[in-house]
Image (tube, rainbow, N blue to C red):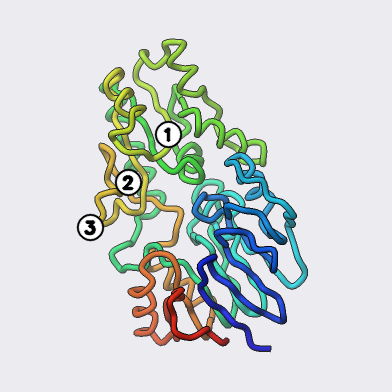
Amino acid sequence: MPSLVRMTKNGILCEVNKKRVFLDPKNSDISGINFVSHAHTDHLPSKNGGTILSSIETNEIANLRGFKMENHVESLDDFTLVDSGHILGSKGLLFDDIFYTGDICTRNRGFLQGAKIPKCKVLITESTFGLSEFIFPKLEEIQKQVNELISGLYGKGIPIILMGYQLGKAQTITQLFGHWGPLYFHDSVKEMNSLHQKLGVSLKDGMGHSEAEKKGLLAKKPWVMVAPMVSNKNKFIQEMKTKYGAVTIGFSGWAQSTKFSFGRRTDYSIPMSDHCDFNELVEMVIQSGAEQVYTIHGFVDEFATHLKTIGFDAQPLLENSLDDLIL
């Protein structure tokens, strides 16, 4: 039976064998199966309704972030959850020869193993870094660069704040650079790290910043702290700089480009991402063997155009498409 795939105001809808499957919907829909790929807030629904399919970890993290999934299931017949390598618990979904990547990364990074791409006829892929300028350095090069940077600052008695998204990047940073000490955490990162530890991820412990400051420990420099990625105008960052002379090192895929200044909001910017870079996206499409590719999130037009030049039937999946897409 043909499948129908379209972008709606509520996200991606696939109608397959009389089933309605919503992929990362804005609101969980009572009329179908709702797949939630991971627990970043831009992928969590804001309302319950119908069956929600996700990993156990995504359900737990969503709970911590204030969204309690009702009618949650971890598996369904004819649906295969595929590790997407993005953050803890992130999954892609394979069903009826359709593979939806969610946010995806094929690189190993600390406790996160890169995604293995299943064969499919239809691929619905993110294209966050779907421009050829986004080629990220190897993890070993990043580790060497950052360790040398920390070492140089430590030698001058300067404390360092390592910054990345509270969910995902902060835990990778903790695992990659947790050997430095004393090690502290912004309270929000400590809370998220504790949940990761509960779910079986080995992360070094450390004191939250409020407690460390209360005890006067931040005045004993140098130290390393892992904190969420926030603006350099953020009150917390300004206080850390003013009171303790802290230097910030930010981790973001956007640091790779000179066009996007928000990727370089810190004293030092390191191009490290939880997404595939351009070459990895292309390789993922090739590995899938897909006959039809739909691009979502990011540089959808540019990436689809590139895929066409190398022989793929590709197009952006847009809400305002004139026709529904019959597969």
Q: Residues within 10 Å of mark 3 (few under 14, many from 20)?
A: few
Residue on which disc 1 sits: 227
Question: In the image, what residue type sits under mark 3?
Answer: Lys
Judging depth in this view, the residue of 10 and 314 nearest the camera is 10
Judging depth in this view, the residue of 293 and 160 nearest the camera is 293
Mark earlier in primary sequence (1, 3)? 1
Can you give x and y, in whole percent of width and height, for residue 53 in the image? 69, 60
User: What element does badge 2 sit on?
Assistant: strand
Mark earlier in primary sequence (1, 2)? 1
Question: In the image, what residue type sits under mark 2?
Answer: Ile
User: What element does badge 1 sit on?
Assistant: strand
Q: CA distance from mark 1 to mark 2?
A: 15 Å
Can you give x and y, in whole percent of width and height, for residue 23 in the image? 59, 66
Q: Which mark is residue 259?
A: 3
Q: Is residue 309 above or below residue 114?
A: below
Judging depth in this view, the residue of 76 and 251 nearest the camera is 76
